[in-house]
Amino acid sequence: MTHTLGRRRFVATVLGGAAATFVPLHRSYARSDSPQLASTPLGDRLAVITGAGANVVAMRGPDGALMVDGGLPEHSADLIRYVLEQNAAPRVHTLFNTHWHPEHTGSNERVGKTGARIIAHENTRLWLGYANEVPLQNRTYGPLPAKALPNETIYTSGDIRFGDEEIEYGYVLQAHTDGDIYVRFRKANVLVTGGIVVGEGWPIIDYKTGGWIGGLVQGLQTLIRLCDENTRVVPATGPPLRRADLEARHKMFATIFDRLSGLLRKGMSPEEAFASGPTKEFEAQMGDSRQFVMLAFRSLWGHFAPDA
């Protein structure tokens, strides 16, 4: 697949040192004016934190805490305080952005000012440098200040060692956006998917920043290959999943992709495509699909053309 944005150099960094012990608090944290934050352990030194706008995975390392995604900007102060308390860490050392959306990059400015490493795909860095329309919301997000932009970017893949944990991260091509990455904790056997997978309901396909349903199907194939039967899969929202859940989603979205592609080639509009019921048998499980079909159908426009 040819990408429309500029290619940047591959960056891979290795951290040395032994990891300090992680002591999860397993409790909720909230003031009357703050979000309800809670943690669920994923292993001895790893936890998923909910309540900040999207799932955040955190662990402690020798030089501070590591986070995968950073919640919404308005929840950042409480989230960072909670992460540091939970990990008995002096600062956030490393932050991954799985893509550019605000519920995943809302802590960039706060941790960027402290000199933290922020890792993302190069396309995510580029999108964060502009004012972009947030999907399905009447607002824009960005441009972020220079210190809030990812300062280590990849085009294909990378890996770091954080304490005694080996962390692999890689590009999932154009799926939810055109800058999606996964983050895989090899020793803990945990895979963080970003916005490609959501725990409940339909995912958002941000076709305005390069996402499309064909890429979503391919992205799920990539994630499945990274899993075994014991892998804990952390979606953008909702509880951890298993490989079988990804396989079920892949089968469903591949079916929908084939149907929508056929309807586009017949020259249908998004409204006509939805009226034909391409997702009808999945709605009992997934909910109303109108919004998803509108986005998914429009995402095909840059990849297919109607039959003449």
Image (cartoon, rainbow, N blue to C red):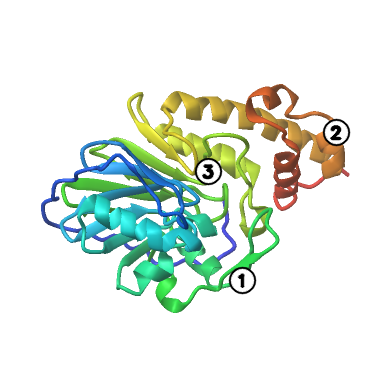
Say whether disc 1 or disc 3 marks the residue closer to the N-terminus. 1
User: Residue most toward the left?
Assistant: 18
Amino acid carrying label 2: it is Ala
Viewer-proximal residue among 46 and 243: 46
Q: Position of residue 62 (x, y in %)?
A: 15, 57
Q: Which mark is residue 196?
A: 3
How many residues crowd around disc 1 within 10 Å: few (fewer than 14), some, or many (20 or more)?
few
Quarter of the image for the C terminus: give it.
Answer: top right
Element at label 2? helix
Look at 51% across and 55% down and name the residue there: 103
Viewer-proximal residue among 156 and 105: 105
Look at 21% across and 58% down and name the residue there: 89
Left or right: residue 22 compared with residue 51: left
Amino acid carrying label 1: it is Ala
Element at label 1? loop
User: Residue most toward the bottom?
Assistant: 146
Answer yes or no: do the residues labelled 2 and 3 have beta carbons within 8 Å? Answer: no
Left or right: residue 44 compared with residue 156: left
Residue under label 1, please give it. 131
Look at 67% across and 58% down and name the residue there: 208
Left or right: residue 1 compared with residue 52: right
